[in-house]
Structure formats: structure tokens, C-alpha cells
Image (tube, grey):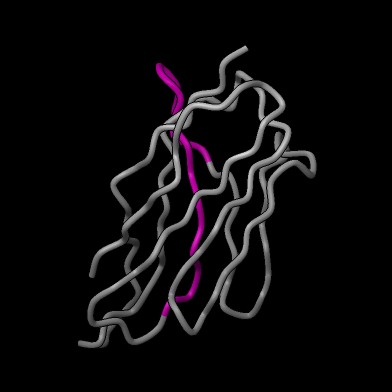
Amino acid sequence: VQLQASGGGLVQTGGSLKLSCAASGSILSIITMGWYRQAPGKRRELVASKASNGNTNYADFMKGRFTIYRDNAKNTVVLQMNSLKAEDTAVYYCNADLIPSSGGFSSLYWGQGTLVTVSS
């Protein structure tokens, strides 16, 4: 199982970026897909997650600026980020709580991270 993230880059304050993540491999079921971020010197924190039943969880700091989309059929998740601020600068990681085709309990998988830099 692999999670491939893309879409990071450099953007000015107030700009927008879209991050995409695709899960591939022998997957039976994906329970939740989401995004975390880690700024320099800080702990990794939740940005947003979306369950297969549509339930969505957003971090308070987003305040309506970010939207998470998920395509269950394609095993993809997208994070649309608008009104970006300098403090949004971080490495963004996608993750998925999924059950592999071999069965068993679900496990958490992580993508490689994509850097988002917001310049003021």
C-alpha cells in the first residue's frame, strides 16, 4: 500500500493551493483519509479528515479556509486550501486508516509529505 501526495509549493499570503493524495496497492477498505501538517519545531497536527461515510473533521485553525474532498471509488483525497497564511507553512502529510486486502484490523498509512510555503 502506498500513499502518494502532491500539490505543495510556494504561494503568497492569501493565495490558494490544492493538495492531492492517492492510495494505491492491495486495499480492501479505506475507513478515513485525511491530512496532517508539521511546521518546523512543532508537533504534527490534524488538518482535516473525511470518513467513508462522509463524516468530516476539521481543525479549528482552518476556520472555513480549507475544504477536504474524497473520492471513495478512486481512493483519493484532496485538500483545497484558500486564504493561506504564513503560519500555514508546513509539511503536509496525507494519511489513510485502511484495511489491506489481506484482511485483519485497519492500520494507519502515511504519504511522503509535501511542503507548503506561504510567503508574507
Query: Residue 104: percent from the left, percent from the top?
Result: 27, 84
Q: Is residue 5 magenta?
A: no
User: Which quarter of the picture shows residue 11?
Assistant: top right
Labels in figure, total: 0
Query: Residue 43: percent from the left, percent from the top?
Result: 44, 28
User: Which quarter of the picture shows residue 62?
Assistant: top right
- Quadrant where the C terminus sits is top right
User: Which quarter of the picture shows residue 92?
Assistant: top left
- Quadrant where the N terminus sits is bottom left
Instruction: State left or right for residue 109 relative to residue 74.
Output: left
Which residue is at the front of the view, 118 or 3? 118
The segment highlighted magenta reads 30-45
Which residue is at the front of the view, 108 or 2? 2
Q: Is residue 34 above or below residue 113?
A: below
Q: Residue at x 28, y 46 (%)?
A: 112
Query: Residue 49: percent from the left, percent from the top?
Result: 57, 58
